[in-house]
Amino acid sequence: GAVVSQHPSRVICKSGTSVKIECRSLDFQATTMFWYRQFPKQSLMLMATSNEGSKATYEQGVEKDKFLINHASLTLSTLTVTSAHPEDSSFYICSAKNPSGVLEQYFGPGTRLTVT
Amino acid sequence: DAKTTQPNSMESNEEEPVHLPCNHSTISGTDYIHWYRQLPSQGPEYVIHGLTSNVNNRMASLAIAEDRKSSTLILHRATLRDAAVYYCILTGSGGGADGLTFGKGTHLIIQP
């Protein structure tokens, strides 16, 4: 089956610094990837849709200048949290569309971000 | 997006079948019914999807009511590894082409 990886799996950073999270499709090409955020004991919330070669589409309420998304290749999308603050601490998860159809999404294992 | 309603939690015994219900009374004619599950501290995992007919795969079965206003995910023989949050999600005919809208899901507890 299609595999999506994320790196790092866990990161701790100081308030005010920036953190980059990578999402890779390992055995397929993903023209579209999605980024979600999940706070403790809550459900996943879609943040943005990342399209290869074009600008990301952000959900309402998500600051595009704070959460920079780059999808420069068919196998890699990156999410950069700029000037991170403690309230950005969360579980960030990416997903990609099933390349052989449009009905399933494959999710990465997630990245736990802690901002101190 | 049409909304789904699931029980907050359910408990079952290991090696017994589990029936997880989902109500989606405002489903439209072209909406697909998807189920994903999320194990603790992991990303969600696709389980199954269907449109009108019941579906089976190696993980589970999906039973869809005739009026499509409800569905049931069936785990035929639960194991401890099936303990997870199960999400019932409706998507348009584009399916995974759009980002998914997750509800609160059902927290499935499996007792040994």
Image (tube, coloured by chain):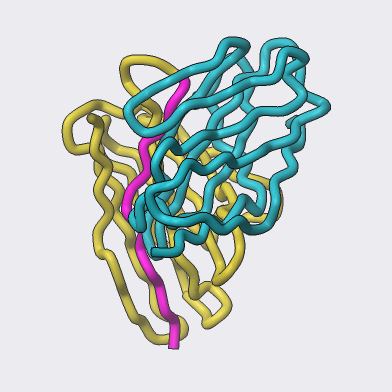
Most distant residue in the right direction: B26
Side (left or right) of A5 relative to B87: left
Q: Is residue A115 magenta?
A: yes
Decide which of B39, B11 is in the foreground and name it: B11
Q: Residue at x 35, y 39 (%)?
A: A71
**Measured along the vertical axis of the image, is residue B2 above or below residue A12?**
above
Colour yellow belongs to chain: A
Residue B79: x and y in percent read 35, 51
Please provide the residue range marked out in magenta.
Answer: A103-116
Q: Is residue A46 magenta?
A: no
| B57 left or right of B2 in image | left
Quarter of the image for the N terminus of chain A: give it: top left
Shown colour of chain B: cyan
Image position of B76 with respect to A110: above or below = above
Position of residue A43 in the picture relative to residue B70 (left or right): left
Q: Residue at x 62, y 11 (%)?
A: B52
Nearer-the-camera pick, A23 or A4: A4
